[in-house]
Image (tube, rainbow, N blue to C red):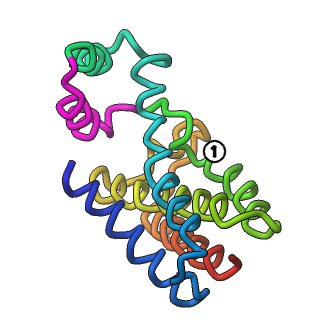
C-alpha cells in the first residue's frame, strides 16, 4: 500500500510542479489547480468502493472490507483493498473503454474556458490512471484487467506503447492548460 500511495503522490507532485512552473501556477491564485489535483488523485479509487459495496458485495474480500468498516477499522480496510487490488477485474473506471471516454471528456474540460479546479481534477485523474496501469503492468506483466471487456490482448510492444502514450497525454494536456 505504501508503494502505491508513494507512486500516486510522488507522480502527482512531480507532474504538477513541472506544470506549475511551466504555466506559472506558483501563485496563490492557482490554489484551485492544486486542490483539483488532490481530488483527482483520490477520486479514481472510489471505483474499488463501488465494487465492494455494489458490484460484488458477495465476494470474500468485499465482505472482509465491509466487516472492517462496520467495526470502524478504516485503515485496515484500505490496506486490504490496496493489497487485493489486482483481484478486482470488473471495475467500472479502471478499464480501457472508460479511459478512452474520459480522454475525450478531459480534452473538452482542459481546452474549455473552465476553471483551474476542473482542469486539475481531470489532469490528476488521467495521471492516476497512467500510474495504475504502470503498477498493473509491473505487478501482472500485462494490462489484462484494463482490456478484459474488449477481449483485447496486447503484446509487450503494444503495452509499452500504450503506457508511454498515457503519460505523454498527461503531459500534453498539462501543456494545454
Q: Nearer the viewer, residue 33 or 58?
A: 33
Position of 144 with respect to 75 (left or right) is right
In the displayed structure, 149 sits above or below 160; it is above
Q: Is residue 29 magenta?
A: no
Q: Is residue 73 magenta?
A: yes
Element assignment for label 1? helix
Residue 145: quadrant of the picture: top left
Q: Nearer the viewer, residue 136 or 2?
A: 2
Position of 149 with respect to 4 (left or right) is right
Main SS class of the magenta portion in the image: helix
Position of 77 with respect to 144 (left or right) is left
Residue at 72% from the left image edge and 64% from the top image edge: 115
In the displayed structure, 14 sits above or below 103; it is below
Q: Residue furthest top?
A: 58
Q: Nearer the viewer, residue 5 or 144?
A: 5
Q: Quadrant of the C terminus?
A: bottom right
| Magenta-colored span | 72-88
Residue at 22% from the left image edge and 39% from the top image edge: 83
Q: Position of residue 144 (x, y in %)?
A: 44, 45
Residue carrying label 1? 98
Residue 95: quadrant of the picture: top right
Q: Residue furthest front?
A: 28
Pointer 1 local density, CA inside 10 Å: few below 14, some 14–19, many at least 20:
few
Residue at 38% from the left image edge and 32% from the top image edge: 88
Count every numbered label the image shows and give the total.
1
Q: Residue furthest right?
A: 113
Amino acid at each position: 500500500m505504501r508503494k502505491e500511495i508513494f507512486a500516486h503522490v510522488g507522480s502527482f507532485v512531480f507532474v504538477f510542479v513541472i506544470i506549475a512552473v511551466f504555466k506559472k501556477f506558483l501563485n496563490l491564485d492557482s490554489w484551485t489547480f492544486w486542490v483539483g489535483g488532490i481530488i483527482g488523485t483520490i477520486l479514481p479509487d472510489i471505483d474499488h468502493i463501488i465494487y465492494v459495496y455494489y458490484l460484488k458485495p458477495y465476494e470474500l474480500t468485499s465482505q472482509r472490507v465491509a466487516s472492517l468498516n462496520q467495526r470502524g477499522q478504516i485503515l485496515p480496510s484500505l490496506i486490504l483493498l490496496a493489497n487485493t487490488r489486482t483481484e478486482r477485474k470488473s471495475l467500472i473506471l479502471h478499464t480501457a473503454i472508460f479511459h478512452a471516454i474520459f480522454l475525450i471528456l478531459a480534452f473538452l474540460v482542459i481546452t474549455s474556458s473552465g476553471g483551474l479546479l476542473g482542469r486539475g481534477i481531470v489532469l490528476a485523474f488521467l495521471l492516476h490512471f497512467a500510474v495504475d496501469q504502470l503498477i498493473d503492468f509491473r505487478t501482472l506483466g500485462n494490462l489484462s484487467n484494463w482490456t478484459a471487456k474488449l477481449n483485447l490482448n496486447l503484446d509487450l510492444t503494444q503495452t509499452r506503447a500504450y503506457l508511454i502514450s498515457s503519460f505523454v497525454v498527461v503531459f500534453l494536456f498539462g501543456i494545454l492548460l
